[in-house]
Amino acid sequence: MKTPTALLIEDEALPRQRLREGLATLWPQLQVVAEAEDGDQGLALALDLRPDILFVDIRLPGLDGLSLARRLKGLAHIVFVTAYDAHALQAFEHGAIDYLLKPLDDARLGETVQRLRQRLQWPPAQLANWLQQWTPPVLDAAPVAATPLRWLQASQGERLHLVMVADVTHFRSDNKYTCAVTAEGEFLLRLSLRELLAQLDPGQFWQIHRAVVVNLAHVARVDRRLTGMEVLLKGSDTRLPVSQSFQSRFKPM
């Protein structure tokens, strides 16, 4: 019997690692042939490698996950990976595909593996008609927790610390983890920046770069330079770059 193959298309390193490790544990026979960090790269790899299964994040740089699925049509069995809650994803239950909610849960991933094992006996479903009828939730912002985080459990070296969220000047994506920066130093969180952002107060914490979220309470001013826009923090020489896609947030009221 042919060894099943999969392609992981996810722009954040930590969720991608969790998915890869979870699949290796729950489905050791599955061969992950490649990984992609954006939709355009994912599309090219899918067309070149022709994997049996695609794990696709809905929110991707460049070509988003839904557009990628439309282009691939019936090429592979598609599992969407998303940070949206189950209520917003009820439409997936009626399609010939599955979904995984972030942060990934081992039990839920196990259910997906079982479904995929069965579905590999048949050709991939044609998703074009279903995707045209389904209206996705607004993708401009990650979902916000009902009660924003006030404290964080973070590590510094071998020690575990309780860090007050209000004391964090900014968060920075650091490979597999997120770094919380305070006046007392830097602390590591075992969360991706996207997972963390969903639990923060959106009125206080703004994403200003793909890898940076800033606490507005610690912003002294915003400077426009020839090289772009920068945020200067209070009582510090720290300057944080603002990506062009986020600069409109700082336009004068």
Image: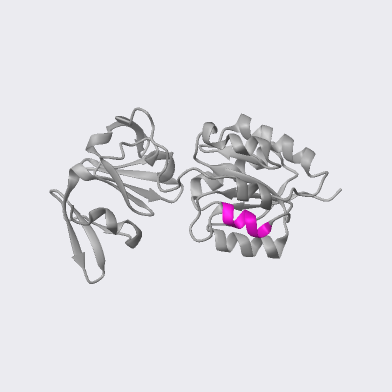
Depth check, front residue: 23 or 8? 8
Instruction: Specify the farthest residue to the bottom.
Output: 226
Quick check: is 74 in the magenta stretch?
no
Q: Which residue is depicted at the point 33% across and 31% down?
A: 149
Q: Which residue is depicted at the point 66% across and 47% down?
A: 130
| Snapshot quadrant of residue 95 | top right
Q: Which residue is depicted at the point 56% across and 63% down?
A: 40
Residue 2 percent location from the top left of the image = 83, 51
Instruction: Specify the farthest residue to the top.
Output: 147
In this rendering, would 188 be left or right of 82?
Answer: left
Is 73 rendered above or below residue 106? below
Instruction: Specify the farthest residue to the left.
Output: 235
Depth check, front residue: 207 or 21? 207
In this rendering, would 226 be left or right of 34?
Answer: left
Is 78 rendered above or below residue 229? above
Residue 97 shows up from this direction: yes
The span shown in magenta is: 66-72
Question: Magenta region's main secondary structure?
Answer: helix
Q: Which residue is depicted at the point 53% across and 31% down?
A: 87
Quick check: is 68 in the magenta stretch?
yes
Is 239 rendered above or below residue 177? below
| Snapshot quadrant of residue 80 | top right
Rendered image coloring scheme: one colour
Residue 189 shows up from this direction: no
Instruction: Specify the farthest residue to the front.
Output: 133
Residue 118 percent location from the top left of the image = 79, 38
Residue 21 percent location from the top left of the image = 61, 42
